[in-house]
Image (tube, rainbow, N blue to C red):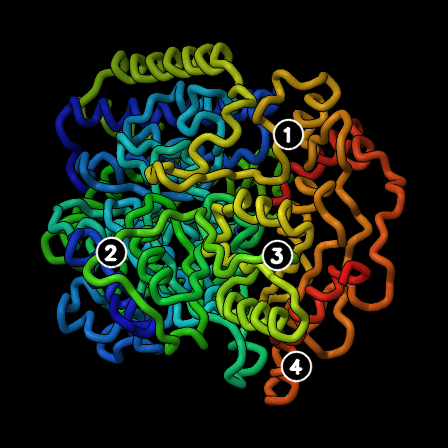
Amino acid sequence: MAEMRMREALRDAMAEEMRRDEAVFVMGEDVGVFQGAFKVTEGLLDEFGERRVRDTPISENTIVGAGVGAAMGGLRPIVELMTVNFSLLALDQIVNHAAAIPYMFNGQAQVPMVIRMPGGGGHQLGPTHSHSFEALYLQVPGLLVACPSTPADAKALLKAAIRDDNPVIFIEHESLYGAKGEVPDGEGEPLHFGEAAVRREGSDVTIIGLLKMAQVAEEAAQKLAEEHGVQAEVIDPRTLRPLDLDTILASVRKTNRAVIVEEGWPHGGVGANLSTLITEQAFDDLDAPVQRVTGADVHMPYSKRLEQAAIPHSEHVVSAALATLEGSL
Amino acid sequence: MADLPDASTCYELLARMALIRRFEEEAGRQYQRAKAGGFLHLAIGEEATIVGTTSVMREEDFLIGTYRTHGHAIARGTEPKRVMAELFGRVDGTSGGRGGSMHIFDAEKRFMGGYGIVGGNLPIAAGLALASQYKGEDAVTVCMFGDGASNTGNFGETMNLAALWTLPVLFLVENNLYGMGTSIERHSAQTDLSKKAEGYGIPGRRIDGMDVIAVREGVAEGLRLAREEERPTLLEAFTYRYRGHSAADPEVYREREEVDEWRQKDPIETFAKRCVEAGVLGEREVKQAREAADEAVEAAVEFADDSPEPALDTMYENLYAVTDPGGWYAVDERSPEPHRGEQEEQMPAAARELAEAGAAYAGREEGPRPNPAIQGDAQEGSAHRVGDHGEPVNAEEGERDEADAAKPDDEAEADEVAEAEDAT
Ligand SMILES: Cc1ncc(C[n+]2csc(CCOP(=O)(O)OP(=O)(O)O)c2C)c(N)n1
Ligand SMILES: [Mg+2]
């Protein structure tokens, strides 16, 4: 095991897959000479050259579309969109093309590409640079959606994404790029999509959190144990499509309570979807309504004070967890 | 005027154009009979542009087009019967009934689609060309699109990328003078479309899209530049669609005389005449080409009619490529019970009818109902617990019967569909 930052783990995943398979290449705005807007592609241009590490013009829809065509032509592009916010300019190629093509042409073409995009708030970047679009992409059939929260998962999931024959939306969190964690030495195995991680075991309430909110969920669990004597089980789904619903349901059947934490908007969010699935399939096991903790239903404000208030913190999660336990404590 | 090629090439060009013409006419008739659904965009009048292009392409070259591409697939060698079956939505269609008229695709013939989004095929063309260049292969990608598509952001973005990366691609704008009902003077500030990519470093050239030989020449040179010199070019082919934009277009935006004028330049008539006058083909061969087209199209309709509808339990096929045996790709996790297309054949008749009528949620006969009452609203400017605002999150007794909620008003909907037919 070696300790490394998430951005390094991601870079290693790409470098290793590029060494392994000539068809893998990276393209995006400032991924080459500039070394990546968040330095995730640092060093790749030096090792692989301009043919395989391609700086692109600022043309999001066309970058993704060129990735779709290249994938249909037998390559395995990794497209970096500078942030999830800019992926809105590429929605047509992502939804109407990348996701639809395998189905619409009945399996005659595949689109093995990874679209990486960092998002999330917390850096005072305001309304246009702080989005969380997990729910948006989760909704689209034909896409796989990954949302890693640790360096080890980031590396193993990105390797799996690159080897997968489906278009993968790979969502990274800007605040996690510098986060350190243990990563297995050497190449390491890809992590199968659809395997949640139980970060902490507990018997009183299940807390499900993704990306940065996986950490917030763990903090909350710590507080619940220390301050309230509540044992929370913490689950990080790691991928939203496919979703490891089995692990989540098994936990809910044990704790009879669930709290879902996400940074995105509440309406039609990851939590809205997941709480419905839990309610549909484990209704009789629930002792309280499923609770959701989400980002505020606003465009991310710039003011530090307002921004922090708009992002879920462990206090919110603690109070939501306690609400599910009302009357039973 | 350029010389005619040898007799067998001339015959092939004529026969292919005649086949596409007959196919399109018949597709229109079948649409009137409601055998084909959705939108139907015919390319009658544009055959020389299509066939002239494909006739000089190599087998390994890629062709990518728009939603008006029945003829493009046929020109590439796709059997007409498979295109007709796709229009009919049948299993033997080019996309097994998944795509319909706007989304024809034939990987084997390197006809790479068939796209319903105007301009959506342009970046994909750049990507296909990039794949060929990256792999050191000789293939050129030919990207065909309409005059209207030259106004999309994708056009500028793709021209820049293709020029910047010197991609082996040939762009061909099928300038039929209209984007739906908007004439080129009313939709493009620069009406000389061949100039439209110059600023991006892509030279353009205008060709007569009604003259199959002129198209061949222009495209052959464009292919050569792309293949040998990695220089993308833009060809503007002047052509014309005789029929409306799609099947129910009343054509209020143009005069009958204009259509008649263009018909004087009909690509099939003029080419046949020229071949006969030059003594390259005889009247008998011209007749033979037409008869062969009649037969092939008649057989195509028969084939499409006989081809089965896709089975409901194939609904989810090919949504994902399942290559990772360790992971799982559940596509519908709502509940363990059957959902649309999964096991409907075993489901009660009512649920099945609903599914077939397009109900969003085909519902179960009994069992838990989705709860419409849970809708949390954000309160104040703080990250919040949804539903944490005093309101009881109660599951109000579902007033609407789930089946009713999901069920469309059959007749009203059928009428609406018929009326909305020509929206895009
Ligand atoms: C992005 C997008 N906008 C609008 C439409 C609706 N639409 C379909 S065809 C068309 C006109 C396109 O004209 P042109 O590019 O000249 O092609 P033509 O139909 O003449 O072959 C329009 C506006 C669409 N399909 N996609
Ligand atoms: Mg047009």
How far apart are the two marked residues, 4 and 3, measured between alpha carbons?
Answer: 24 Å
Does residue B205 show up?
A: yes
> Residue drawn 29% across and 65% down?
A183
Which chain is mark 1 on? B
Q: What residue type is labelled 3?
A: Thr
Measured Cα–Cα span from mark 4 to mark 2: 39 Å
Q: Which chain carries label 3?
A: A
Q: In this view, does B46 lie to the left or right of B338?
A: left
Of helix, strand and loop, which one carries label 4? Answer: helix
> Marks 1/4: CA distance?
41 Å
Q: Name the residue under label 1.
A: B337
Q: Which of marks 1 and 2 is in front?
A: 2
Labelled pair 4, 2 in contact (Cβ < 8 Å):
no
Between discs 4 and 3, the one toward the N terminus: 3
Q: How busy is the neighbourhood of tag 1: few (under 14 within 10 Å), some, or many (20 plus)?
A: few
Tag 3 residue? A206
The residue labelled by disc 4 is: A309
**Which residue appears at 14% of the width and 73% of the height?**
A46
Q: Where is residue B178 in the image (x, y as percent from the top left)?
A: 50, 50
**Numbered mark located on residue A188 in the image:** 2
Mark 1 and mark 2: Cα distance apart in space: 38 Å
